[in-house]
Image: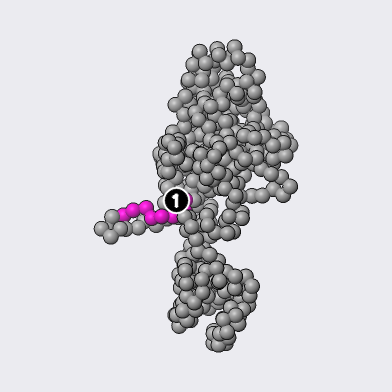
Amino acid sequence: MAKSDNAPLSDVRIIESSMLGPGAITHHLADMGADIIKVEPPSGDYIREMTWPIVEGVSLMHLHINRGKKSITLDLRNPKAVEVYLELVRTADAVVEAMRPGALAKRGLSFERLREANPKIVFCSISGYGATGPYRDMPSHGIAYDTWGGIVNPAYDEEGFCYIPEHASVGIHAGPMFGALSILAGIVRARSTGEGCEIELAQSDATAYMDWYRIESWLAYERPESEVTGNKADDYVRRAPGTAGMKEGVRYQMYEAADGHVLFMASEQAFWKNFCETMGRMDLFEKWPGSKFADHARNNRELQLILRDIFKTKTCKEWLRLGNEKNFPVAPVNTPKSIADDPQFKDRFPLYPVEGHGAEMLPYPVKFKGTELPEPTHAPTVGEHSRAVLSEVLGYDAAKIEELEKSGVLG
């Protein structure tokens, strides 16, 4: 990684032992300038062969999740390799175990031993279902956290076979984000108190937490209707939780435009009035003025038919311009494929190019004013930085590195 002294995390070092998607926990920190040393077994993390697409022989998942990191191989079955690991820990702020809980402890690298080597170390274990509970030992992949968390419902094809429907993955992203935030919180405290901490995180827990609104709504609906109702615009009748309650919406709904679809969001009375004035249809406002806030004109099919015809008269671009000029909310309806052509996306996401990264990639989405985040390096090959880490981080000379290689420490 091209180091930048003013990158937000330029003075943070993390030792990572990860397999597959949970390694994203340090990806966010690497993007902000942290020095991430990925310790791999001699055979490497098989993420390089997982999922699709495969870009010139390497998975896109590896190219994205492990960009900006360094890779060193250590055969932790070798006691000398364990000692090298501990020496790396002495130079670091945090250690990440992104695999089944206790994997490092089995190699003699428990939190207690890590803390003996470095009292300020922050240890974060991220796994599928966490270190406790009846599911703690179950093998799993990322989709499991989406199904467990109620994010995705079963679908059936025309032959009656059940299948996983297309959906935005939550489980593989939420856990790493919460983990990265927690690691930084631990480091802040360790630097002020001199004491490290142990963090334990389940990707399944994070998935459920991301969907707190629906889960908590269902819990609220278990209480009597005298205590928990719907909202005023719906005459206090309960709607289905979250976006499921949007299906019957009219003033807040997707509509087909002349060349695609847009999302219309005139749930506030003021926005609805602006739309009607712009369209020269104040008769619609006079007939259905609605409530001041949160009014979707639910189940008003007569109005929905009229709006359906109105929206077909203009292109998506024209609707966006009008909404912006006349102050009523309209949004594009993109797909994961089409969004790259969206002008807002192009402005906010200057993609990292294929050259130097292996594939086009989205940069870190947060901007630090006055600071340019370092552009991450290409995701490493297995053990690509073994010699450099041993030399530059631990100060080993060539003779010692050669000795370690001969003794099988690096595999």
Residue 302 painted magenta: no
**Magenta segment:** 162-169
Query: What is the x, y in percent for residue 317?
Result: 55, 68
Question: Residue placed farthest to the front in the image?
Answer: 355
Residue 389, above or below 8: above
Query: What is the x, y in percent for residue 227?
Result: 55, 70
Q: Nearer the viewer, residue 399 or 251?
A: 399
Residue found at x 48% / y 35%: 19
Q: Nearer the viewer, residue 341 or 148?
A: 341
Query: What is the x, y in percent for residue 60?
Result: 47, 41
Residue 2, above or below 333: above
What is the count of numbered marks?
1
Q: Nearer the viewer, residue 159 or 314?
A: 314
Residue found at x 36% / y 56%: 154
Residue found at x 60% / y 82%: 277
Q: Which residue is mark 1?
A: 146
Q: Which three-letter amino acid code belongs to the residue tagged 1? A: Asp
